[in-house]
Amino acid sequence: MAAEALLQVQRHEHMLAELRRRGVVRVRELARDLGVSEPTIRRDIATLAARNLVVRVHGGATLPAQPRPERLRPAARGFIIGMVVPSLDFYWPPIVAGAKAAAAALGVTVQLRGSSYDPEEDRRQIGRLVDARQVDGLLLAPSLDTEDAERMMRWIGRLPVPAILVERLPTQWASMPRRVEYVRSDHALGLELAVHHLHEQGHRQIGLMLAHGSPTSAHLLRGWRSACAELGIPDATVVQESVALDDPGHQKLLHDNLLRCRRAGVTALIVHSDPHAIAVTRICAELGIAIPEELAMVSYDDEVAHLAEPALTAVRPSKTYVGRVAVELMVSRLQDGDRRPAQGVVVAPELVVRQSSLNRGRVMIRAAGPRSPGCAATG
């Protein structure tokens, strides 16, 4: 009975966290993510509704209506916030949606521009918004993984309107004449969550596969090393993809890297991002490697991880929340100016556990032997 009560508490916490992040939850999605029946989720919603923590709607639940602080509303109306993101498809749409939702609630406008992970294109898009003199502040996600990063940050710091970085960590933050604020996901923590989960499932030889050209990779690698050191497990099995997913040679590279990881004794693999993880599951199916019985898998991003076969456990950055906080932080800056201290907001991801990593008693964990050199970095 105590175990059932604990599971119910965990479901309630997950449901409330999802509501705070997305504003609405669906019975079908919660049942799928939590691995329980839809009637169970409906009973959970009824319990929370009786405590006035949620409001039942058709097919799901929302948060109770709460009055927003009026301090932001009147002064905020009329502000125009420019937003430049490196992509308008994968990863960024939930962030943009969160920003636009917050802007609508506060009576401000977001002018969206798309860039292309290119510093010069970032400058062009930012410059156009500033030169038009139609924006009061900027939400930016520039490319900061190049040699030009410091020059880019100095340029942003000298812009005539305040700027907030989104999913980026400013370089030389302490020495800048005007500190550029930021809101970002704690990707290192997200990776640590994945490693700890696999360790709890009994895995001691865990591999990490990082995506090509992603600014997230450095944070994931830092979290990986931290978690492995804390748990006392090898951290040598790291594969840095050297070609993009749409490159003709990518499939063979994935195939070769997977076999090398298997030869290194890896029984669990963390893959960034979802498309790469799904590609790995397909190769596993072709090679007859059963997931999770022979190889457990965790994806990083949780955009489409649930569509894989089997459904992939995934680390889910709170993207909608990141976008919302970025707008709220900008409105606060525009209202208060330099009267309040500069802020950097770090948002914790969550781990969504699905079939691909659950040890049902059939996962064969190899005994720990001498430390293996693992997979050499290919990037």
Image (cartoon, helix red, strand yellow):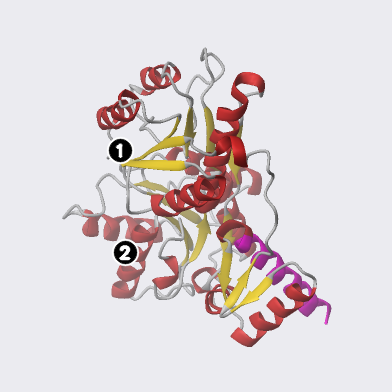
Q: Position of residue 224 (x, y in %)?
A: 53, 45
Residue at 45% across, 38% down: 218
Residue at 64% across, 87% down: 39
The disc at residue 279 is 2
Residue at 49% across, 71% down: 356
Report whether residue 37 is seen. no
Start and end of the magenta stretch? Answer: 1-19
Query: For the residues marked 1 and 2, what is the alpha-carbon distance in whole angstroms?
Result: 23 Å
According to the picture, the residue beneath numbered tag 1 turns out to be 117
Q: Position of residue 341 (x, y in %)?
A: 65, 23
* Residue 72 position by quadrant: top right
Q: Earlier in the sequence, mark 1 or mark 2?
A: 1
Task: Check residue 85 for magenta coloring.
Answer: no
Q: Quadrant of the N terminus?
A: bottom right
The disc at residue 82 is none
Q: Nearer the viewer, residue 341 or 315?
A: 341
Left or right of 339? Residue 81 is left
Query: Element at badge 2?
Result: helix
Q: Residue furthest left?
A: 248
Left or right of 121? Residue 43 is right
Residue at 46% across, 49% down: 100
Identity of the amino acid at label 1?
Answer: Tyr
Report whether residue 18 is seen. yes
Task: Check residue 9 for magenta coloring.
Answer: yes
Q: Position of residue 148 (x, y in %)?
A: 33, 21
Identity of the amino acid at label 2?
Answer: Ala
Query: Element at badge 1?
Result: loop
Left or right of 152? Residue 349 is right
The answer to whether 94 is drawn above or below residue 62 in the figure is above
